[in-house]
Image (cartoon, grey):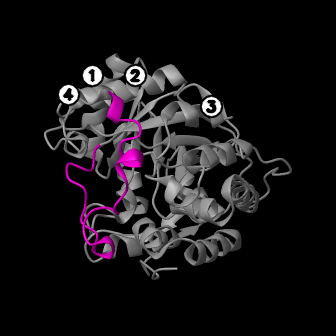
Amino acid sequence: MLSVLADHRDTARQVLPPEAWSYYEAGSGEETTLGEAEAAWRSYRLRPRVLRDVSAVDLATELLGLRLPTPFVVAPMAFHALAHEQGECATVAGAGRAGALSVLSTRSSRRIEDVAAAATAPWWFQAYLMRDRGLTEALVQRAAAAGAGAVVLTVDTPYVGRKSRVDGVRIAVPDDEYLINIAQHLLPGAVGRESAEQDPSMTPEVIARLTEVGGLPVVVKGVLRGDEAERCVQAGAAGVIVSNHGGRQLDRAVPSAFALPEVVDAVGGRVPVLADGGIRSGTDALIALALGADAVLVGRPVLWALAAGGADAVAAALDALAADLRHVLAVAGAARAADLDPSTAVAWPAGLAGRG
């Protein structure tokens, strides 16, 4: 883990209320998957190329027609106001300073329009299919109107995973924050929290429906199998995110680092593939890019930074990751991510080295 991320983590643990810290850090079940995420990237070893001109290294990447200066993306995470009074507004402001794309969670603690106004870089909107599907469609339409460039449909949460650290599935959040984007769309007499829970009957047809409703490409998040990635692409997905939800859903799910090659192979370049889960350094990102990812999402380190120092610290964390990636790409003999290929990173027989 980069030292700046570790420093932010230490500060966040000191300044956050214990219940907020536990909620952000929690994994599901026995937290086996949570504990393996970082070690899975570290279990790969690199085969650098030499005698290559790496005097200038370009981190730019293209996603769904966007040319971005960095392949680091802020992952969708709930309730940023637990970490900072400005919530997601501070997060997107910091990400913008670093030139990073942000993905705004449905469970945002600030209004979609307010976050959009604070954004200075492109952003996407993450959607859950809720029991009242009209809520999801209304939020997707609002996000599109506010300037979102894509919808990220999370598909690995038919039910929210149980987390022992928070004695249930999530921390208690007041209605005025939990329903801040939802309340205005509730049907008369509806119970907000029940209507806003995930719909466990979701099937692939939702991808086309949300594409139609919002007029935006839909990227599917939460895929760990090649055959499931194929189903998503066949159903109209514009991209796939390899993710086990930060270890917060199905415990003992395979780490993203090990699922990525199979998904990349199944997709075959038809749509972009992104990955998240345990990215803590430029070297982690390099391995993901070598295995075929077009970009990587960063989750908890952004929340640590937000708690530690608001937008400035978020920008510093993302800048540090980009600087580290630029350095290790050069040392590995690559002037850009496109110079990497799966032969650059090999799985090492030692396997998982333990949690860092």
- Name the residue carrying label 3: 117
Visible in this render: residue 285?
yes
**Cα distance, mark 4 to mark 3?**
30 Å
Query: Along the line of sight, which residue is nearer the eye, 66 or 100?
Result: 100
Residue 189 placement: quadrant? top left
Q: Which residues are magenta?
A: 155-184
**Cα distance, mark 2 to mark 4?**
20 Å
**Cα distance, mark 1 to mark 3?**
27 Å
**Cα distance, mark 1 to mark 2?**
12 Å
Looking at the rendered structure, the kind of residue marked 2 is Gln
Residue at the outermost right position: 55
**Looking at the picture, how far across and down is residue 178, in whole percent?**
37, 47
Visible in this render: residue 47?
no
Looking at the rendered structure, the kind of residue marked 4 is Pro
Answer whether residue 173 is magenta in the image. yes
Mark 1 secondary-structure assignment: helix
Answer whether residue 161 is magenta in the image. yes
Q: As drawn, is 231 to the left or to the right of 150?
A: left
- Name the residue carrying label 1: 209
Looking at the rendered structure, the kind of residue marked 3 is Ala
- Name the residue carrying label 2: 141
Query: Which label sits in the foreground, 2 or 4?
Result: 4
Label tally:
4
